[in-house]
Image (cartoon, rainbow, N blue to C red):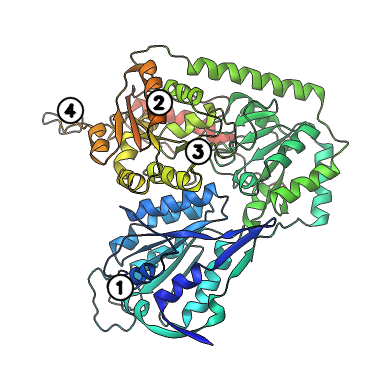
Amino acid sequence: MTKKLTVAQATIEFLKNQYVRRDNIENKFFAGCFGIFGHGNVVGLGEALKENLDFKYYQTRNEQAMVHTAAAYAKMKNRMQTFVCTTSIGPGATNMITAAASATINRIPVLLIPGDFFSKRSASPLLQQTEHSYTQDMSANDCFKPISKYWDRINRPEQLISSLLEAMRVLTSPSETGTVTIAMPHDVQAEAYDFPNEFFEKRVWYIPRMTPDNFLLKKSIDIIKKSKKPMIVAGGGVIYSEAEDELKDLVENTGIPVAETFAGKGSMHYKHPLNLGALGATGTKGANLIAKDADLVIGIGTRYGDFMSASKTAWQNPDVKFININVKEFDAFKQSAIPLQGDAKKTINLLNNNLKEFNTSNDYLDKIKKHCIEWDKIVDEVYKTVDENNPVQSEYIGALNEFIDDNDVIVCAAGSAPGDLHKLWRTKNSKGFHLEYGNSCMGYEIPGGLGVKMADTDREVYVICGDASYLMLPSDIITTIQEGYKITIILINNEGYASIGGLSNSVGGEGFGTHFKYRNPKTGQLDGDFLPVDLAKNAESLGAIVYKPKGIKEFSNALKKAKNNDTTTVVYVDTIRDRKMDGYAYSWWEVPVPEVSKSKKVQKVRVEYEKGKKQQKNYIKPS
């Protein structure tokens, strides 16, 4: 039996019948569709969505933003549910590329369905079609190929069947997930075909919990038992696997301390005496000191990004070994590790069952606990208000951290705030800390906050956003109001690109091109007066309630008001550009410095850069 549907109608009919199942919990995989319509999708997918009201359509204001929202939602759902995103051909499609890259880098499933050129080429060149003199089989959508985990173009209706099945295989794969792009030509979307009925039957995709190879597991257990200074690096895979309790058991049973990546922060409660907190360039003093001398590193669900590895200077012990627990083979083999390719929850359990008699020494435990106590005192000092009239960013973070409830969520992505949050934020649950730091994408914050709120409406969502990042994508404040998903935005006015300005200063660049200033007619440079931009008024014009507190006391009062509001609220604060947060103990991050420069500052920094380079390790010694 068959059902005659257009390609667009068949697509939506298929997608709304896709389910995932893990640990006896089953749910629909797609929560709906974000879209902005143009001539490339309005009469195809637009008509199909209008027909299928049980597959909810959400109107957004920016194509990049809607992919960020979908990714944030999927991350909050531990990759067990996501959204479809559809756009027209041309700029609508290419606007999604930045966010698509972020999703793939962060291993988050999103499905993109951009419109495409006419497959029949009957009206070429189309409005918004990119032409090439050497081929007629390429469009702007080919740009998605390097940043998609699966890519296809539907040139004939019958191709849809195999393409969507492959798309679902990748989207639901714990190891291969990321952005999936299905380009749909205008004309093919509207073309009808007799699709087999079984294509539209309910289909459940089972998410497996794989276990690692027995030989490699035994080898890993032997190495752990022989270690004297082991440590665990908890990455996002701990949380996606829902292995927080298993990790806690392993840590408490063995005395092996934990350090956290950006994605893994919250794997354990910040107060746990064996949680050293953030690791690497934005790490805590204790985590970095323990890492320096570690003889064994057990990476769980991490891809070893340069921030958390301090650009491969974090582990200085010449005999250090690595064991990696990861569902993705590519990540499991990093650092010449013993690759325990498998699900974090299952694999940690296996380690636990085989390490009953193992414990780190009392001296080692005492050292770790002292580091944790010392760091808690450091955070207390950093959170203290020094000058009520001129608060710095860390003081605002402290006031917010002390105000929010245990179940609330902080969202951030770019600038200096992620580094401060990684070090300072006191995480109390695994979903309370939501950072997009694989791509550190400016503009993610507000649409990301929307996605988090949509995923769990019972939590208050607080978005920290600098002025430069806000200017990238403020438009979906409107969507939060339209759909009734209230978020609270802490909008920090730095009068420019403060984070990159600080980096520029640190390498002798003197903050060139990072202030929001007029061009000075005398110098010809952008070093005149500051621009008279009022982002508070901008947010208000988009429908948000806006407060402009002065000082920490007023800021805390504004947070109380915001919590009682039922619509999106912006708390707009000024801070001095210098964030006054230094790195702690072996927190180097590689930023190449010019080898030749007229600047004495640059020359001096180059010397320090070369010292840092000498500390880098290849980690190629077999574990």
Residue ID for mark 4 = 528
For this view, does 344 lie left or right of residue 559?
right
Q: The disc labelled 4 sits on which kind of residue?
A: Gly
Residue ID for mark 3 = 459
Query: Quick check: 542 above or below 388?
Result: below
Q: CA distance from mark 2 to mark 1?
A: 45 Å
> Are there few (<14), some (14-19), or many (20+) residues within 10 Å of tag 3?
some
> Are there few (<14), some (14-19), or many (20+) residues within 10 Å of tag 1?
some
Tag 4 and tag 1, C-beta contact below 8 Å:
no
Horizontal and vertical percent position of residue 330:
62, 56
* First along the sequence among labels 4 and 1: 1
Q: Give the foreground label among 3 and 4.
A: 3
Q: The disc labelled 2 sits on which kind of residue?
A: Leu
For this view, does 84 lie left or right of residue 405?
left
> Are there few (<14), some (14-19), or many (20+) residues within 10 Å of tag 4?
some
Residue ID for mark 1 = 43
Q: Is residue 162 visible?
A: yes
Which residue is the extreme one toward the right?
Answer: 357
Q: CA distance from mark 4 to mark 1?
A: 50 Å
